[in-house]
Image (cartoon, rainbow, N blue to C red):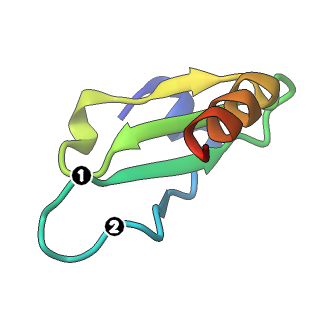
Amino acid sequence: MSVMEKQFNLQWHKSTYSDGSGGDCVEVAACGCAESVVHVRDSKDTARGSLAFTPTAWTAFLAHTAR
């Protein structure tokens, strides 16, 4: 768990596309910090940490993947 994850006590949410069969799963947490960051991590290996995106970058990523 990263320092930011500990400091802001991030609340992780698993993708609704994830099922219990061990497939590809991601979790997302929004940081309430001043920078307003969206964190994404692999739900199968949470010890590896997370990637951080600005809300604008995250929205662009979601729009691109939804096509």
Q: CA distance from mark 2 to mark 1?
A: 7 Å
Upstream in sequence: badge 2 or badge 1: 2
- Compared across the picture, whether 1 is left or right of 47 comes to right
- At which x and y percent is residue 35? 82, 22
Evaluate whether residue 41 shows in this view. Answer: yes
Residue that protrudes farthest toward the left in the picture: 21
- What residue is rendered at 13% in x and 64% in y? 22
Where residue 29 appears, as percent x and y from the top left, is 59, 48
Q: In screen coordinates, is 65 left or right of 51?
A: right
**2 and 1 marks in contact (CB < 8 Å):** yes
Residue at 64% in and 40% down: 62
Residue 9 visible to the viewer: no
**Mark 2 crowdedness (10 Å alpha carbons): few <14, some 14-19, many ≥20:** some
Q: Residue at x 79, y 42 (%)?
A: 32
Q: Residue furthest right?
A: 34
Q: Callout 2: helix, strand or loop?
A: loop
For badge 2, the amino acid type reads: Ser
> Which image quarter: residue 61?
top right
Residue 24, percent from left and from top: 24, 52
Residue 43 position (above or below residue 31)? below
Find residue 59 and report its horizontal and vertical position in percent: 75, 35
**Residue position for label 1:** 24
Is 63 situated above or below 50?
below
Q: Quadrant of residue 53?
A: top right
Task: Please name whichever residue, 46 or 66, is drawn nearer the observer in this view of the structure.
Answer: 66
- Work out whether 43 lies above or below 39: below
Question: Residue furthest toward the front?
Answer: 67
**Residue to which mark 2 is pinned:** 18
What kind of residue is marked 1? Asp
User: Quarter of the image holding residue 39?
Assistant: top right
Q: Is residue 34 left or right of residue 11?
A: right
Where, quadrant-wise, is the C terminus in this rendering? top right
